[in-house]
Structures are given as C-alpha cells and as structure tokens.
Amino acid sequence: MEKTYFFDTLRRIGSTCREQLSWLVGMLEGPTLGTEEWNTLHRTLHVFAMHAVGAASFGLAGRDIDIKELPLEVVTDSKSLREALKKAGFGIMYDVIDVLERVARRERFSLQQQPQAGIWDRERRRYLRGVAPEDDTFRKAVLRSVERCVFEQGHLLKECQAPAKVKPGRKRKGEPKSEVGTCGKLYVARKQTQLYCSGSCLSRTLTRKKRAGKRAKNRSKKRVKRRGK
C-alpha cells in the first residue's frame, strides 16, 4: 500500500479516535455495499488497522493482510449495512458490530489477547512494543483498532432510544395496533448529555410525550365529569 493512499484515506476517516469511531458508526448505519464498495472498504479497514501501530511502523503494518474473513455477500434488502451484516451472521464486520453494540448498551465485551513482541523501529532507532507479526491477523488488527477507539471515546457511543418512525397512512379497521419500537441507531454523541442521534428523533420524542400528556389529561377530565353526574 502506497503512503499517499494511506494518508489520503486517513484524512477521510479521521486521525483521532472520535473521528474514526464516527466514521465506523456512520458507515455501518449507511446503506449496503456493492462489490466495488466492498473492495474500497477492505483497503479502508486496512488503513484503519494500520493506524493503530502508528505511521512510524509503516513498513511492518503495510504488509499484505488476510481479507478472506470479510463477507463479500450480504443481504441486500436491509435498511442498513449493520442490519445486513447481522443477518449474514459472520465476518470481521459482524464482530465489530457486536463490540460496538455492547459498548452502546454499556455491556461487557471481551478483549482480544494479543501476543506482544519487541519491534525495531528504523526511523526512531528504538524498540517498540507491538504484536508479533506471525501471530497477527486482519481480524485481530481491526478489533484492536476498534478497542483503542472504544477505550478513549466509547463513553460517547450510544444507541438512540427515541420512538421509531410510524409508517404513514391510516390503519384498516380491526387491524391490531403494532408496538412502536425504538430508533436503535448507533451514534457518537457530541457530548455525554446528548440523548438522541438526531434533531428529528428529539422532535419525535417530544411530540409523542406532549400527545401522551394531552391524552392523559383528557382521560382525567372525562373521569371527573362522570363522577360529577
């Protein structure tokens, strides 16, 4: 991999943990990918994994890595890439989703134990602590980068609990009321007090609460009237 591509991609996905976590979540909550987009994602994840060891170790991190674990076929009728990968049920991105969802729900997630090795850095002329090349895999490298971002910015990763959108149109007579779920979208909050992924979800939540309050008030008035008769 050329250094130019490495740094161009790094500018796109960000160089800080917050930026990279936002890119990762945004990509997973986006639409499903075609073949060419998958190939681009392979290389982008390569850069994401390489950045964890630092540009100084470029020669080591830039070696060819195994991308066979990435799912090349996903469910196409899904709302998002995350949903498609969960339906597929395998692959490196499925493992990434599992970690991110556990973090967003404040659940425990398992760390990947990595064999450590002393790696000679020619530019710095010093030994650096890193993962032994012969024991490393693409899956471990990507998850290691995810964990690095989680430990630094994971407290801002959340799952939106706003009410889900209701399908437009009137319901047929006798049709049972369907339960309203939650938005469920993963997002990186701007600050810890941010509760919803977007302004529309915040507006929907406030509107539902306001309508529920009015209905409760009207029911209370009707009960008072019946008692007064």
Image (cartoon, helix red, strand yellow):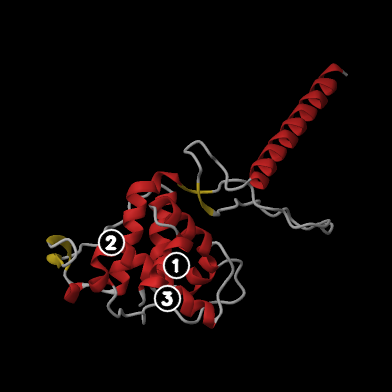
**Left or right: 221, with 74 as reference point:** right
Disc 1, SS: helix
Q: Disc 2 designates what residue?
A: 54
Please tell me whether mark 2 or mark 1 is closer to you in this view. Answer: 1
Identified at 44% across, 58% down, the residue is: 14
Please tell me whether mark 3 or mark 1 is closer to you in this view. Answer: 1
CA distance for labels 3 and 1: 15 Å
Q: Disc 3 designates what residue?
A: 42
Residue 40 visible somewhere in the drawing = yes
- Which numbered circle lies on residue 8? 1
Which numbered disc flags the more N-terminal residue, 2 or 1?
1
**Left or right: 85, with 146 as reference point:** right
Q: Residue 115 appears at what percent x and percent y?
A: 15, 65
CA distance for labels 2 and 1: 15 Å
Q: Which residue is at the front of the view, 98 or 196? A: 196
Q: Which residue is at the front of the view, 28 or 123? A: 123
Q: Which residue is at the front of the view, 39 or 147? A: 39
